[in-house]
Image (tube, rainbow, N blue to C red):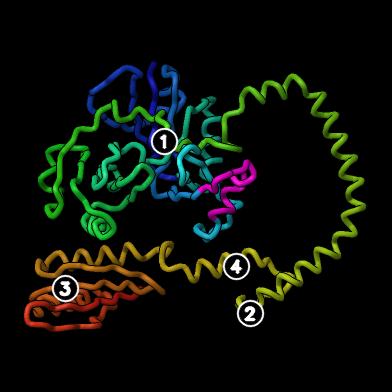
Amino acid sequence: MSSLVVRFDDLSLQGFSWVVTETENDDKPVRWQADSGRSLAELAKNHHQLTLVIPQQYVYLTHYDLPDRVSRQVLGAIEYQIEDQLAQDVEHQHVALGDLSANPVAIAVVEKSIMQRCVELLQKQGLSATQIIPEMFLCPWFGNAGDVCLLECADGVILRYGDHAAIKCAWELTETMLDHLAAEQDIQIVNYYLLDAASYPSVKVDKYPGQQNELTLNSLKLNQTGVINLMQRQFQMSSIWSKLLGIWKWVLGLLLVLLALTAYNRAIALSGLEAQLSELKAAQYHLLKDYLPTGIDQSSDLKNALISLLKQNQSGENEVNFLQLLQEFTRAESAFASVTITRIGYQNKRLSIDVTSNQLSEVEALLQALESAGQTAKLDKLSIKPNLISGQFVLEEG
């Protein structure tokens, strides 16, 4: 039984690449093919299963520690349990859960608009997908502590370092991201899965032990329990229920009439609750007014105002120019072999990078190189010792 795996290039869902896997053991190498103008329906017509893959940069991965006695209510409102991590309106986010027998439970978050776009594409093509998954699950993972698996993609690389932990970045930032991971955990080996095996010597990061591997079709068996299927809740396939609703339309009509009568009766009672709601809003505003910016009054949307405040105070996870600043610094720093990065921080549109070196001249030359490239940069906390020079480079946006 064959399965078609389709990986989209971006959120437009126009361009994609695809590969076909078989149920039986298949050790053939993976060779992604471009869509070449063929429709998704034409590609999928001779295959039993269809898997759609969302680019990893549009999926947020996290986890949640379940209480000893978890209720359906907790699972049904899991997005509100992790609301403080998102700094986004949870009503616009779709939350998919991993294996509920594990604790903490793995969680994948994607915008509802992206999922709705996938559903509309399937409906337009007359298709039914088996699952929709994040791109990280295309990268093999063996569960070994200290392993990092690197999968080359058309638009960068995916660094997978756990069952549900991965980073996608540009090729130029691979070494920097590995250094960042090495600060959190020991890296025993980096397993490379490249589109062209001959490029391995030139792209390997020499400071970490590496191994070239061939990506085979066996690694794309994407129905394991560890894979998070984004098709959950309102995006779960419900063709059986649709058929039942088609048969019992008159029952649904009667229920709608009853609901309308109930709503009319409750409307009278709701009029008395309006005053209580107004009092609650006044109490909420009284509690929050000291933390809200000027121009926000009791009639404003307090929830969205708080979300905007969280976005402004966030330490840099959503700062769009972080990678640009880091890429410029990495490009300049690569010319100075004695300079070593020890720490990276980003806050209030300022990128701070702690470095060490045994040559003061190279540290100063690195500062001049950044300024020559048009960067707003300065060197702080400079410490000069006989065998060690340390300091902090500060780069500002703009």
Quarter of the figure with the N terminus: top left
Circle 4: residue type: Leu
Q: Residues within 10 Å of mark 1 (few under 14, many from 20)?
A: many
**Residue hosting label 2:** 290
Q: Residues within 10 Å of mark 2 (few under 14, many from 20)?
A: few
Which residue is at 53% across, 60% downward? 84
Tell me if residue 269 is in the magenta stretch.
no
Q: CA distance from mark 1 to mark 4?
A: 34 Å
**Residue hosting label 4:** 306
Where residue 377 appears, x then y in whole percent?
Answer: 26, 78
Which residue is at 58% across, 44% downward? 69
Labelled disc at residue 356 = 3
Circle 3: residue type: Thr
Q: CA distance from mark 3 to mark 4?
A: 40 Å
Q: Residues within 10 Å of mark 3 (few under 14, many from 20)?
A: many
Q: Which residues fall within the magenta stretch? A: 66-82
Where residue 211 appears, x then y in whole percent?
Answer: 15, 41
- Quick check: marks 1 and 4 in contact, CB under 8 Å? no
Which residue is at 22% across, 37% downward? 195
